[in-house]
Image (cartoon, helix red, strand yellow):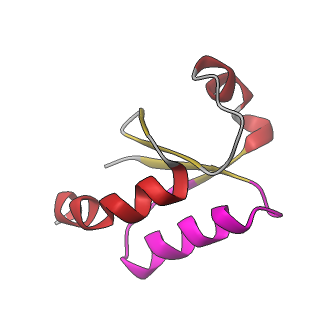
Amino acid sequence: MDIKVVTEMWCEYCACAKSLLKEHDIEFEEVSILDAMDLMDKYELNTIPQIFIDGVLLEGGYTGLKSNIYNLKKKEL
């Protein structure tokens, strides 16, 4: 499973999303918002974190991740 988290250092919800993934031993790639502007524009996104799983946007950012963390954990097994 390929997980990318669009983030920036000053973002509290980004830190929470990364911590949640780490807590559950789920590997992810951190992508700076500056390097992800094409994705942000493509999906018309204005906020971070944005989480992409196998190239598909997980709606809801951190809240969406929190709601789906156990499903992601099952996929990792």
Q: Does the magenta-highlighted stretch encompass residue 6? A: no
Look at 43% across and 81% down and name the residue there: 23
Residue at position x 41%, y 65% in the image: 66
Q: Position of residue 4 (x, y in %)?
A: 51, 47
Give 50 or 63, whichever is nearer the viewer: 63
- The answer to whether residue 74 is left or right of residue 17 is left
Along the horizontal axis of the image, is 2 left or right of 42? Answer: left
Q: Please say whether residue 16 is one of the residues in the magenta stretch.
A: yes
Query: Could you tell me residue 73's position as x and y percent?
Result: 25, 66
Which quadrant is home to the C terminus?
bottom left
Residue that appears at 74% across and 36% down: 35
Q: Nearer the viewer, residue 77 or 59?
A: 59
Between residue 61 and residue 1, name the one nearer to us.
61
Res. 36 image quadrant: top right
Image location (x, y in percent) of residue 40: 66, 29
Compared with 19, 31 (above or below) is above
Q: Which residues are magenta?
A: 8-29
Q: Quadrant of residue 9?
A: bottom right
Q: Is residue 51 above or below residue 63?
A: above
